[in-house]
Amino acid sequence: MKQVLWVDDLRIPQHYLAFIPVKGPYEVTWVKDCSAFVEAIKSKQFDHVCFDHDLLPEHYEVKDWDEYYRNSMMLETGLDCLKILLEYCKEKELPLPNLSIHTGNLIGRNMMQKLISDYGHDWTKVPVF
């Protein structure tokens, strides 16, 4: 059974699983914030991780993401979760799971794609839906 980690505060994973490139059957772990994300990746390896960007109610009100990232001490976005995963896999010498991005936040999506590229992975192979 494929292990899928769904990172989103609102969207119900079962409504979107048809869009991920991993064929079922699945066991889905749904996390809604960064602390639950860290617990999940430390507890088991996942075949696929699906990222939303905006994970807190305040994220839906942000008008200027550049300013938000410069001034916020505790971000807890999907971008932060992605960075944690990339660092964790690198540090533990684990293979990076398949990734997908399902955010409606265009700026957040672009930052996530850039981060994937900065870590030496081909972001063009990461499905966005």
Image (cartoon, grey):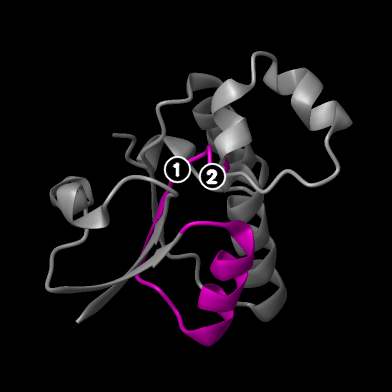
Q: Quadrant of the C terminus?
A: top left
Q: Is residue 81 left or right of residue 43?
A: right
Return the x and y of residue 55 as percentages of the image width and height. Answer: 54, 44
* Up/down of 53 relative to 28, above or below: above
- In the displayed structure, 8 sits above or below 36; it is above
Q: Quadrant of residue 28?
A: bottom left
SS of the residue at dot 2? Answer: loop
Label 1's element? loop
Q: Amino acid at mark 1?
A: Asp
Quarter where residue 84 is shown: bottom right
The residue lying at 14 percent from left, 63 percent from top is 23
Q: Nearer the viewer, residue 79 or 8?
A: 8
Contact check, label 2 and label 1, Cβ < 8 Å? yes
Q: Identify the magenta region.
A: 32-56
Q: CA separation, marks 2 and 1?
A: 7 Å
Q: What residue does disc 1 label? A: 52
| Percent coordinates x, y for residue 103 in the rendering | 41, 34
